[in-house]
Every structure is written in C-alpha cells, then in structure tokens.
Image (cartoon, helix red, strand yellow):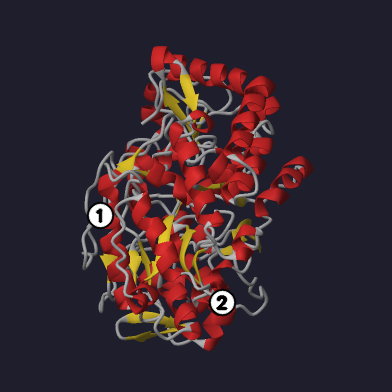
Amino acid sequence: MTVEDHPSTPGLISRRGLLAGAAAAGALAATGCGSGGRPGGPGTTGADALKRALPRYLPGRSVSPDLPSVAGANGAASDPAFLSYPARPVRTVSATPGSGGTYVTRTPLWGAIPPSAGNSYYDAVNAALGATLKMQPADGNTYVDTLPALFASGKLPDWIQIPSWAGQRLNLGSAVDRFADLTPYLAGENIARYPNLAGIPPAAWQAGVWNGRLYGIPCFSSPNNFPGYLFYRKDLLAAAGVSPEVRSADDLFALGKALTDAKAGRWAFDDLWPYLLFPFRVTSTWTAGPGGRLIHQYETPGMIEALNFAARLAKAGHVHPDALAGNTANGQQRFWSGKVAISGGGTGAMDGIDAKGGTAADRDYDRQPFKVFDASGGTPAIQLGPGAGFFSYLNKRLTDRQIRECLSIADFLAAPYGSTEYLLVNFGAAGVDHTMSDGNAVLTARGQKDVATSFQFLATGPQVTLVKNGFTQVAEDYAAWQADAVKHAVKPLFFAMNISEPPQYASIGLQVEDTVKDVRCGRKPVEAFRSAVDTWRKQGGDQLRAFYEGIRDKYGTGG
C-alpha cells in the first residue's frame, strides 16, 4: 500500500504548488548539499554538516524482486517490482520493538477515516509493536492547513507527520527545535541498531536534516519521485485507431482531433497542467542564465511555449469544458468513464486501485502513461524530486528511553516488502483484515473498513511497485514506464535544498498563477502573462532572484 495520488501530495504536490515551483519539488522543505561546511540560516545545511548528520546506508538483501530496479540518469532509479508476495515472508525484526509505551500520533489520510474503537487493524499492529500508538488520522486535503494552529497551541503530539511542502508555512527551520534531535541515535554507524531504517538510502534522509541536525524520519522514499506526467486510455486510442506513440507536441495535438467528438460527449483532453510543462523543458523553478543571473521559470521560453500550446488545445475545442471551468473534483470520473482520453496526474494514479475503479466504469479501461517526450522532438526530460517528501518527527519532550522505543517501532514499520512485518503493517491481521489470493494480499470486508494508510506516515521502507487488486499487468506496465522515465530524469537547480524564503515573497506569484490559468484555458492572450510577470518582478520577483543568488553563492545549488 502506498500513498495514492491526491491533490495535496507527487510527488505529490498541488497543481498550484507545482506551478509555483515546477520543478522545485520540495526545494522549500528539503536540505542543502552546497559547498558550505556548517549550518547556515534557519534550516539550511552545508555539505559537510549534512554528511555528518546522515545515517550510513546499509541496504537490506532479504527479498529479491521479480523486476529489479533500473538505474537512470542523475541518481534516479526505478522502484523494484514484485508481482506476488513471497510465499515464505521473512521476519526482519526478531524481538518485540516496544516496551509498553503509549504514544499519541497525528497523520494525514486521503480517504475515509476508519473507526478507532474496535479497529482490528490498529489492535493487531499495536500488539505486534508491544506498544500503543494512538492513531489520529486527519483529512489529508486540509491536513497542512491545520498544522499552524496546532503548532501555535503548543500541544504537539508525541509523533507527527509533516509533509515537506508544509515546512515553509510552518517556518520549520526555526520551529524544528520542538522535536527530538535524532542525530545521536541515527547518524553514521548509529543507524546499524535499526537495520530496516538503515536500508533507507541517504537521499531520502536528506530532507529531514535541519540546521545540520537530523530530525525527520522519511516515509514513502523513492529514487524516482516524479511529480507526475500525462496519461492516456490505451483502450480508447486503440478503438479510435490512433497510435499512443507521442514524440512531440504536434503528435499530441493530432490526438485531439482524432479523439474529440463533442456531440457524443467525448473530448481528447482533460486538464494537462502543470504536467504539460515537462515536455517544454520547464523542469526547474530557477535556471542558470548568462553572467550568473538566475532565470525564473516564468521568464523561460518553455513557459510561453507550454501556455501557447495549452491555449491552442482549448481553442480547438479538444479540452473537456469542465476541465476548462476548473472542475477538477470530477476529473478522475471523466477519465474512468471515457469522457476524456488523456489527462495529467501524479504518478501514483496508476495502480491496481485505479484499475479497479476504472474497470468498474468501463471493463476495457486501460490507463497508460505516455513515454517521456520533448515538445520539439528533441531530448526528453522529466523533473526529479527529492528522495522523500513525507517526514515524521518525535516530540522533544520524550525521554531518551521513549525516543529509543519509538525508533525501534519505526524500524518495525520500515520493514521491506516481502517481510512479515510489512504484510501486517500494510494489510493487517491474516484471516481478519486480509487473505491471500493469487499470491497477493486482498483486504477482507473488515479490512476495507479498518485498514488505512496511517502507520506508514510514521515510517516506511523504500517504495516498491506491487500488484493491487489482482491487476498484475498494471504493475508490470508501470515498472516498465519507470525504467524508461528514469533515463530522462533531471535535477532542478537547488535540488533538495532547505531554503526558507522570506515571508514577504510568499504571495507575489499568485497573480501570475491566476493569469496562467486564464491564458492556458484560452480566456486571455499570452501578452497578459508577460504583463503579470513584469508586475511580479516589480513586486519582489527581482529581490527573490537576488535572494536565491545569495543562497547559490554561499551554499551552492544542491544535487
């Protein structure tokens, strides 16, 4: 079970958030690896201090995947894939990790909140942990919005999930001292005490380092954290007799005419923004320009080209009217029902859960991602995000004994796919919450009510591609796409750096983003965007540029 594609998360970033930093992908809430050797301002960390804070990587070898990871460009790699759960799951934690402690947690959940009383799943996991984690999942769509008030109240729980993109809003670089410093427990060789945590790569831990110290425990880590891409209905394209081989923007536009039949209530495209930016090589919020000047994505030719192309699709009548009206809530249903054949979305959208919903609406449903392509037919590129975007934190008020107990629990929760611990944490008790069918765990009626992605927001091992709801081919297809996509991964400038922007710049891009929506939907000319960017520069964009140039000069540009 993994984090599903939802508007507030891919990697996991909102449409507005991704537009504002297309390719920053966590730059505001990750940790730097510039040239400095000591901590800088609130949150910022130089390369030498970062190296001292990170745990040593001790990869596990307990389970072999059916489809091994494929190495790509710039440190990217596909996730290993498993087509069935090992018949003999391995046990990775020999002793009960807990010692009877009770801890209050807070995590997000995109989905129905399960009952807390009489929850067979919670009870089974806590029994195995030898401790009581009081799970308090909250609505993921509003989760980050609730955190500032929680911080202001001074009543933080014992263990809390803080997504990376919340760091700027919480000024976490300055507020992180409310949490336990895990450096003495996990840095370097100290991590060896927790073998499953040691199996999480250093790139995933990096964004949990603040001010030269390790605070965050990574969740859902992956070496291919792409924000998302463009998907198509393979069955609908086949029925229309058109090829899904798209190698340029012209190829994509040609599909619009072939697939749109407004009288029949079918359109080629749903909302493709902001994922449409990647084919036009908008893969970084800031890029290096002539004479050392930084160029914002708003100022790039690719941004203009992407806007013009999106407006061209809209004016040609190839985009669903509801998408142009901003009705994103029904986007998934439009795709499932065949009202649209092509849509943009997070990479987590393609799995057996999506396939189950899609085939319920149309038995021929077959979602596929387009191969990464370049709008002009040149070298493809897709933006790579940091190794993890979700981190959990332990409250500073916990004692040394309690911190060690929680880390032992985290080690249990981070057990890899193929282990007995993973099966329990993700699917609950055998025979109660899940049964095995064709080599994979399937939730029972009880499990569908009680099991929810909750413990996983406290700690998880590296992600894998796996079969859900029996859709083996979906897992194979997604693994194949990843293996190709990682070849085209590019790191944005300031990759995985913890940069707390001055608050006066927080809203200067809102007018630009609103104008972007009007331009790409064909309601305003591209000149309106250029005018909005001129205003952005005058209202603080040029000062923000100077701020980032100062970061570059002192700490480097990450990577």
Q: Which mark is residue 263?
A: 2
Query: Residue 268: percent from the left, percent from the top?
Result: 47, 66
326 to 433, vertically: above or below: above
Above or below: residue 33 compared with residue 91 = above
Work out whether residue 228 or residue 352 is closer to the camera in this orientation and state it.
228
Q: Does residue 396 appear in this view?
A: no
Tag 1 secondary structure: helix
Q: Residue at x 56, y 55 (%)?
A: 315
What amino acid is found at the position of numbered circle 1 in the picture? Asp
Q: Tell me the amino acid under the disc marked 2.
A: Lys
Question: In the drawing, does residue 238 fall left or right of residue 305?
Answer: left
Q: Quick one: 88 or 475, which is closer to the camera?
A: 475
Residue 343 seen in the current view: yes
Contact between labelled residues 1 and 2, with CB atoms less than 8 Å apart: no
Q: With respect to residue 406, does 263 lie above or below?
A: below
Name the residue tied to disc 1.
484
Residue located farthest toward the top when viewing the structure as drawn:
291
Where is residue 495? Give x, y as percent: 42, 33
Q: Residue at x 66, y 43 (%)?
A: 514
Instruction: Judge by depth and name the residue closer to the eye, 271 or 219.
Output: 271
- Which quarter of the image is occupied by the C terminus? top left
**Residue 408, image x and y in percent?**
45, 54
Query: Helix, strand, or loop for circle 2?
Result: helix
